[in-house]
Image (cartoon, helix red, strand yellow):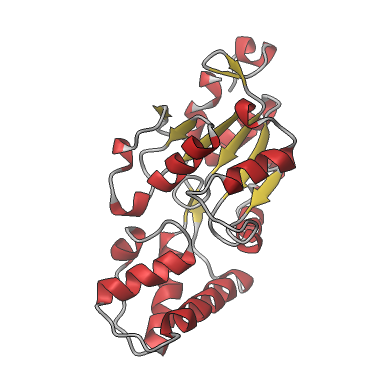
């Protein structure tokens, strides 16, 4: 629960006014690796490629589905005919969307996420999810896991010309929230999130349990670490 002192003052980040928190999805709010691996392996099987363990796929997550396919092909050392990667991406998207449409997904929120979102919302902060996943899938996941009530906006990888690590999605989220980027804070789990936040001149806090493209998230050059989203409201 928020302290009485925290509830009585306006949120701040290091003595600067804070109006909004931008949150990454995969690896920050949700553990989605099992479903991503399942959809990827179904697409690979259709093209007679070997499957990849979930632990391997976990290390490939980041920068969106096209990069996932590129990394999977490279990991398998596969020769892909012209247009083959585009076909793999199309089939991955199909299987991933079908799993969610049929409610066959196993993605789940990390511990403390629902409580953390509720407390941030109670502070009067505007909240946006900024992800490289498609907006429709992100919205669907937030609804299925009961997190959508606290989220004001969702910016997906298909909402901008460029995905993170470009600052464009973060700045779009600020415009949608009608807040100055100087009064925003980013929460993520990867180099992609840190680079996007730095380029947008937005401070960034990271969680140590995410994907970070196979590298240790605890080595990220962010402004602070939180073990759980519930650790963030008391800092504000």
Q: Is residue 61 above or below residue 153?
A: below
Lateral position of residue 142 relative to residue 235, left or right: right
Q: In what quadrant of the picture does the C terminus appear? A: top right
Residue at the image position 59 percent from the left and 47 percent from the top: 168
Q: In what quadrant of the picture does the N terminus appear? A: top right
Q: Where's residue 93, x and y in %? A: 54, 74
Whether residue 35 is visible, yes or no, is yes
Residue at the image position 46 percent from the left and 74 percent from the top: 39
Q: Where's residue 203, x and y in %? A: 50, 29
Q: How many numbered badges does the structure rendering display?
A: 0
Residue nearest the viewer, comparing 41 with 205: 205
Dividing the picture into quadrants, the one containing residue 51 is: bottom left
Outermost residue on the left side: it is 77
Dividing the picture into quadrants, the one containing residue 69 is: bottom left
Residue at the image position 61 percent from the left and 27 percent from the top: 182
Dividing the picture into quadrants, the one containing residue 216 is: top left
Q: Where's residue 57, x and y in %? A: 34, 64
Q: Where's residue 79, x and y in %? A: 29, 85
Residue nearest the viewer, comparing 27 with 13: 13
Lateral position of residue 149 relative to residue 195, left or right: right
Residue at the image position 64 percent from the left and 59 percent from the top: 135
Whether residue 37 is visible, yes or no, is no
């Amino acid at each position: 629960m928020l302290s009485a002192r925290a509830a009585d003052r306006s949120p701040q980040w290091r003595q600067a006014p804070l109006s909004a928190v931008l949150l990454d999805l995969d690896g920050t709010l949700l553990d989605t690796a099992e479903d991503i691996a399942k959809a990827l392996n179904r697409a690979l099987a259709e093209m007679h490629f070997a499957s990849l363990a979930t632990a391997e796929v976990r290390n490939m997550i980041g920068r969106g589905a096209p990069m996932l396919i590129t990394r999977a092909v490279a990991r398998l050392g596969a020769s892909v005919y012209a247009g083959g990667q585009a076909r793999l991406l199309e089939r991955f998207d199909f299987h991933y969307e079908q799993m969610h449409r049929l409610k066959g997904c196993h993605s789940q929120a990390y511990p403390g996420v629902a409580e953390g979102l509720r407390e941030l919302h109670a502070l009067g902060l505007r909240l946006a999810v900024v992800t490289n996943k498609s907006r429709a899938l992100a919205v669907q996941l937030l609804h299925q896991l009961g997190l959508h009530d606290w989220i004001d906006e969702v910016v997906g990888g298909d909402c901008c010309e460029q995905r993170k690590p470009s600052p464009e999605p973060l700045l779009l989220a600020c415009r949608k929230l009608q807040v100055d980027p100087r009064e925003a804070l980013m929460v993520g789990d990867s180099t992609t999130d840190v680079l996007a936040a730095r380029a947008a001149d937005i401070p960034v806090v990271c969680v140590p349990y995410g994907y970070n493209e196979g590298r240790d998230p605890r080595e990220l050059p962010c402004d602070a670490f939180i073990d759980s989203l519930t650790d963030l409201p008391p800092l504000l």
